[in-house]
Image (tube, coloured by chain):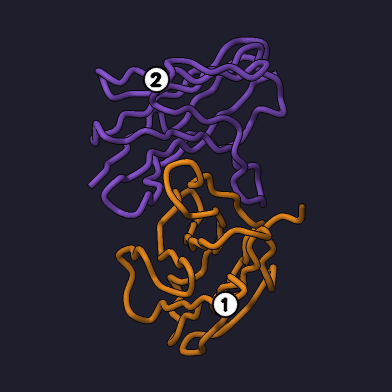
Chain colours: A purple, B orange
Amino acid sequence: GENVEQHPSTLSVQEGDSAVIKCTYSDSASNYFPWYKQELGKGPQLIIDIRSNVGEKKDQRIAVTLNKTAKHFSLHITETQPEDSAVYFCAAIDMDSNYQLIWGAGTKLIIKP
Amino acid sequence: KAGVTQTPRYLIKTRGQQVTLSCSPISGHRSVSWYQQTPGQGLQFLFEYFSETQRNKGNFPGRFSGRQFSNSRSEMNVSTLELGDSALYLCASSRGQGEESETQYFGPGTRLLVL
């Protein structure tokens, strides 16, 4: 089955700087990789996702890159703002378990003013 | 389109009691997944229901159970509550019908406190 590792567990960056969170996965057949943001007291919200037929996807200040050969994908946030402070989760789909999402452990992103 | 709703939002129980949590998925979604999240922890997968059948199951004891109704609404039950069951319980819905429909949308969660 699929296994997802996420690093770092905590990331502190200065407001305005960029933040990068990386996830690795084990199943080369996985073809869907979403990223979720969870703010305090709320459920996770999908912020961007990527499928294995593309290498990069952007949405304003957020981008995700995928390296299928190395089996890793990364979330990039540019020009960070205080409202970016949250916990971010990556996931990969397990093709052997009815497309169940397998989750990373999460990254707490702290934006310092 | 209305999002995923969960009831109740907050719940306080005592050890040994049982609890039932409810989740209403987005209209048209047939898959409901349940997760447990304890403070500082990630998303621990409980189970997933699709078309009234449990399709996937995580590594939780049998005290945790669930079901899904014909309208795709789902309930989860925890019997003989323990202090360690205190957590945020999240449900997520998706269309659940294959590679193009597996995006999950989460509800706000039910926060359970066991005393």
Label total for image: 2
- Type of residue at label 2? Leu
Measuring from the top left, give residue B10's x and y in whole percent: 68, 70
Closer to the camera in the image, B78 or B12: B78
Side of B101 where B25 appears, left or right: right
Residue in view at x 66 percent, y 66 percent: B6
Instruction: Classify 10 Å Cα crowding around label 2: few (below 14), some (14-19), many (20 and above).
Output: many
Q: What element does badge 1 sit on?
A: loop
Residue in view at x 62 percent, y 14 percent: A14
Q: Is residue B23 above or below residue A15?
A: below
Residue in view at x 48 percent, y 41 percent: B100
Q: Is residue A48 above or below residue B23?
A: above
Mark 2 — on which chain does it sit? A
**What label sits on residue A9 in the rendered view?**
none
Disc 1 with disc 2 on a shared chain? no
Measuring from the top left, give residue A87's x and y in whole percent: 55, 38
- Occupied quadrant, residue B74: bottom right
- Type of residue at label 1? Ser
Q: Are marks 1 and 2 in contact (CB under 8 Å)?
A: no
- Occupied quadrant, residue A82: top right
- In this view, the residue farthest toward the right is B1
**What label sits on residue B70 in the rendered view?**
1
For the C terminus of chain B, which image quadrant? bottom right
Side of A7 where A46 appears, left or right: right
Measuring from the top left, give residue B32's x and y in whole percent: 52, 63
**What label sits on residue A66 in the rendered view?**
2
Closer to the camera in the image, A33 or A106: A33
Side of A86 where B17 appears, left or right: left
Residue in view at x 48 percent, y 55 percent: B96
